[in-house]
Amino acid sequence: MLENGLIMMAIIFVINIFYVSFFTIRMILTLKGYRYLAAGVSTVEVVIYVVGLGLVLDNLNELQNLIAYAVGYGIGVIVGMKIEEKLALGYITVNVITMDNGLDLPRKLRAKGYGVTDWEANGLEGGRWAMQILTPRRYELKLYQTIKEIDPKAFIISYEPKAIHGGFWVKSVRRRIAQEEKKNEQETMV
């Protein structure tokens, strides 16, 4: 009896991890505008949900099943977030403010394939250099690292744009960043 109870708890636990992971991915796909993919994921999601909930409701008198359901739900949130981080869908806009234009940060970022719009700005303590960079999310951490290597004191803030229209960069930046990554891989192999 105890073995069956543990197996039931494990099944409910795993089902809920899968359910919530699919739920998280579906929500992100919906927010990013991937309607049809989100619809497909939701079809799988609802089947997993009904099966898991059915198991809990059929054995409602077993408190451990409810606990397994709740803990599986919580872990599913974490797993779903990790999956979303790996997918890194969409773009981010990064605003950078630096005090030292002598570092030539905009040119160095452009050389690495990023589209940079820059301008002179004024802050509380005088002149600054401001930049706006639009990049695919999968390059976000690499961009931060590059900026910090060039100017550790740079002020960086990022956000996800709702819509993007116009500009040279969408195809151009993807191609240049891909070329830069290929070049870096070749240098690493040598």
Image: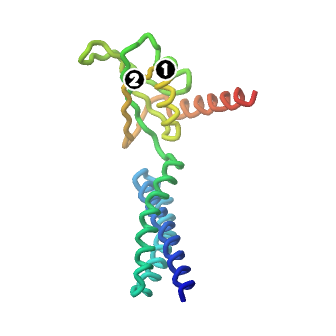
Q: Which type of secondary structure does the marked residue at label 2 adopt?
A: loop
On the image, numbered disc 2 is attached to which residue? 154
Amino acid on which the number 2 mark rests in the picture: Ala
On the image, numbered disc 1 is attached to which residue? 150
- Residue drawn at point x = 47 percent, y = 60 percent: 38
Question: Is residue 133 placed above or below 136 in the rendered structure?
Answer: above
For the residue pair 181 and 74, the one nearer the viewer reads as 74
For the residue pair 90 and 154, the one nearer the viewer reads as 154
Image-based side of 83 in relation to 162, left or right: right
Task: Determine the CA span between mark 1 and mark 2.
Answer: 9 Å
Check contact, mark 1 vs mark 2: CB within 8 A. yes
Find residue 70 and report its horizontal and vertical position in percent.
40, 70
| Quadrant occupied by the C terminus | top right
- Residue drawn at point x = 37 percent, y = 38 percent: 159
Q: Which type of secondary structure does the marked residue at label 1 adopt?
A: helix
Toward the front, the furthest residue is: 2
Find residue 49 and report its horizontal and vertical position in percent.
45, 74
Find residue 121 and report its horizontal and vertical position in percent.
30, 17
For the residue pair 46 and 39, the one nearer the viewer reads as 46
Toward the top, the furthest residue is: 102
Image-based side of 186 in relation to 118, left or right: right
Amino acid on which the number 1 mark rests in the picture: Ile
- Residue drawn at point x = 41 percent, y = 58 percent: 27
